Amino acid sequence: QVQVVESGGGVVQPGGSLRLSCAASGFTFNNFGMHWVRQAPGKGLEWVAFIEYGGSNKYYGDSVKGRFTISRDDSKNTVFLQMNSLRGEDTAVYYCAKDPQEYSSGWYADSWGQGTLVTVSS
Amino acid sequence: DIQMTQSPSSLSASVGDRVTITCRASHGITSYLVWFQQTPGKAPKPLIYGASSLQSGVPSRFSGSGFGTDFTLTISSLQPEDFATYYCQQYNSYPLTFGGGTKVEIK
C-alpha cells in the first residue's frame, strides 16, 4: 500500500537551514506529484509546496516562497524540502503527501506521512 | 489568493446528531474542494473531493455539496469516531489554501 515517510526534522536556530526528506513506496512515484503541508502546534493546516510528476513545475505558499525549495529524485522515490532563512513561525509538523491524480498539476494531499517536527528556536 | 472561511470554528454535538459545516471561498472555485478529517496526533485524511465525491473507504454518513463559493460538509448521524477537526481546502488555483478548521466536540 501507499507509504510516505518523512525525516530530517529537528531543532534549528533562526536564520538557519534544514532539509527534509520524504521516502515514498507502494505506487509509481514517477507518475505522481507530491505535496508538503505543515501544521504549527495547536494550529490549522497550511499548504507549503507541490512538485509535479517529472519535477518541471513547482508551486509554493506565499509565506515560504523564496526561502523553501521542493525537489525530487525519482531514482530514489524521494522528495525533498530545502528550508532556508528559517523563522520562528516556521515551527511546525511538516507532512509529506502524495497527490491523488496521476500526471496532474496538483489537487490535494491524499496519502499522508506521519510528519516530522521542525522547531526554530535559539 | 483564494481565502477559505469555515464556520463554525467549533461545535458541540451528541452521538446520532446531524452536523453541518460550511466553507466559503473568496472567489469561485467550481467544484475543486476537498474536505479533510483530523483526529488528535494523526495526519489528516481526505473525506470528500470534488466537493461531493466520497473518498474510497469513507462511510456514507459523510456527504458534501456546493459549487462556486459555498460548500457544505454534512455528517448525517454523528458517531463517536467522528469527533475530530474538519478542514476544507480549495485546489482550483495556487497557492492551495485551507479553511481555518471546525472542531467537533462531544456535548
Image (cartoon, coloured by chain):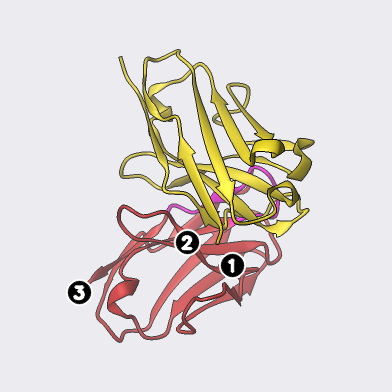
- Residue A22 in sight here: yes
Which portion, as a residue range, is magenta?
B90-100
Between discs 2 and 1, the one toward the N terminus: 2
Q: In which quarter of the image is the C terminus of chain B?
A: bottom left
Q: Is residue A115 above or below residue B13?
A: above
Which residue does the image show at 34% across and 81% down from the upper left?
A: B78
Say the numbered circle drawn on residue B45. Answer: 2
Residue A35 within the magenta-colored segment of the rendering: no
Task: Name the kind of residue labelled 3 in the image.
Answer: Lys
Between discs 3 and 2, the one toward the N terminus: 2
Q: Name the residue under label 3.
A: B107
Q: Is mark 2 on a helix, strand or loop?
A: strand
Q: In this view, does B59 lie above or below B22?
A: below
Q: Nearer the viewer, residue A111 or B46?
A: A111
Task: Tell me the red chain.
Answer: B
Which residue does the image show at 70% across and 55% down from the upper left?
A: B92
Instruction: Give the number of the mark in front: 1 or 3.
Output: 3
Task: Tell me the yellow chain.
Answer: A
Q: In this view, does B98 lie to the left or right of A79?
A: left
Whole-number angstrom distance, CA of label 3 to CA of label 2: 24 Å
- Residue A62 in sight here: no
Task: Name the kind of residue labelled 1 in the image.
Answer: Asp
Q: Nearer the viewer, residue A57 or A31?
A: A31
Whole-number angstrom distance, CA of label 2 to CA of label 1: 22 Å
Residue B25: x %, y % from top left: 59, 57
Residue A51: x %, y % from top left: 69, 40
Q: Mark 1 points at which residue?
A: B70
Instruction: Give the number of the mark in front: 2 or 1.
Output: 2
Q: Are marks 2 and 1 in contact (CB under 8 Å)?
A: no
